[in-house]
């Protein structure tokens, strides 16, 4: 059982500066934040930023899924809209980027398959897979979890009511708790209620322009 907690923050260095300090052959340390992002909201951004800065990662990649592998799969707007909202949300933060391999592959998105692909494509990279404390409890049910846990380092973001422990290795990070969720945002849009500050202004404008979540 791994209960490591990260409390120190490290500066985010540019790729060029890292190469000057560490040399061009150092292993890259990057985060992956997967999800449907239907839509992306402020809580997602805060969580990703906290993990990235506290662990000193070079990048945190938002990785939208094509089709979540859950029995109770959420009805999501087409990938085109979710990707464009993510691009708008992360614009201006050099720590953030997009990873679209699951969208490009299509079908059900199993994290194991994704990580096999990414590790083969980027053998010089160590991946830190970001999940909320509530999702840590579901790790035993993840597809090929024993093999997956050898391909990535899981990063659990602490949350009240969930013990920071797991039978799998998890690095635990503290982050401000924002009670925001995509379901609530969709409901507010459908009810013509304000979503200001719940999502970035650019995302709110995009939702309005495209008429998303009105039905």
Image (cartoon, rainbow, N blue to C red):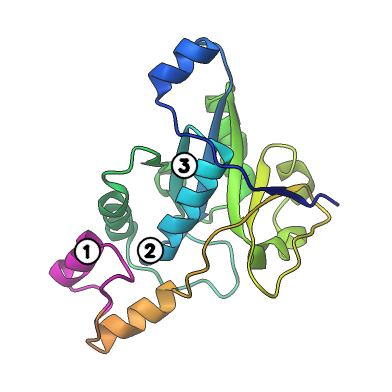
Please provide percent x and percent y for residue 13. Answer: 44, 28
Distance between the alpha carbons at the discs numbered 1 and 2? 10 Å
Distance between the alpha carbons at the discs numbered 3 and 2? 15 Å
When asked about the image quadrant of residue 16, the answer is: top left
Q: Nearer the viewer, residue 4 or 35?
A: 4
Q: Nearer the viewer, residue 97 or 55?
A: 55
Q: Nearer the viewer, residue 10 or 202?
A: 10
Label disc, if present, on residue 96 of the rendered structure? none
Examine the rendering and report whether any part of residue 215 can be seen: no
The answer to if 205 sits in the magenta stretch is yes
Can you identify the residue that label 3 sits on?
A: 60
Q: Is residue 201 left or right of residue 105?
A: left
* Neighbours of disc 3 within 10 Å: few (<14), some (14-19), many (20+): many
When asked about the image quadrant of residue 196, the answer is: bottom left
Q: Is residue 143 left or right of residue 62?
A: right
Q: How many marks?
A: 3
Which one is earlier in the sequence, the residue at label 3 or at label 2?
Answer: 2
Can you identify the residue that label 2 sits on?
A: 42
What residue is drawn where x is 59% and y is 22%? 123
Which one is earlier in the sequence, the residue at label 1 or at label 2?
Answer: 2
Can you identify the residue that label 1 sits on?
A: 201
Q: Quadrant of the C terminus?
A: bottom left
Examine the rendering and report whether any part of residue 10 can be seen: yes
Which one is earlier in the sequence, the residue at label 3 or at label 1?
Answer: 3
Q: Secondary structure at mark 2?
A: helix
């Amino acid at each position: 059982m791994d209960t490591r907690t990260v409390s120190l923050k490290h500066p985010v260095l540019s790729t060029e500066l890292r190469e000057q300090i560490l040399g061009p052959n150092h292993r890259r340390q990057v985060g992956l934040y997967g999800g449907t992002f239907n839509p992306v909201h402020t809580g997602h951004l805060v969580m990703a930023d906290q993990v990235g800065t506290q662990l000193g990662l070079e990048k945190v990649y938002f990785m939208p899924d094509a089709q979540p592998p859950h029995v109770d799969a959420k009805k999501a707007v087409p990938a085109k809209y979710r990707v464009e909202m993510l691009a708008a949300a992360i614009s201006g933060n050099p720590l953030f980027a997009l990873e679209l391999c699951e969208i490009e592959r299509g079908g059900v998105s199993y994290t194991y398959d994704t990580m096999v692909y990414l590790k083969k494509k980027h053998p010089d990279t160590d991946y830190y897979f970001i999940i909320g404390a509530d999702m840590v409890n579901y790790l035993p049910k993840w597809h090929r979890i024993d093999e997956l846990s050898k391909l990535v380092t899981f990063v659990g973001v602490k949350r009240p009511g969930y013990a920071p422990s797991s039978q799998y290795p998890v690095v635990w990070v503290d982050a401000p708790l924002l009670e925001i969720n995509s379901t609530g945002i969709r409901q507010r849009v459908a009810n013509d209620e304000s979503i200001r500050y719940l999502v970035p202004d650019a995302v709110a404008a995009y939702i309005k322009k495209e008429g998303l979540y009105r039905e």
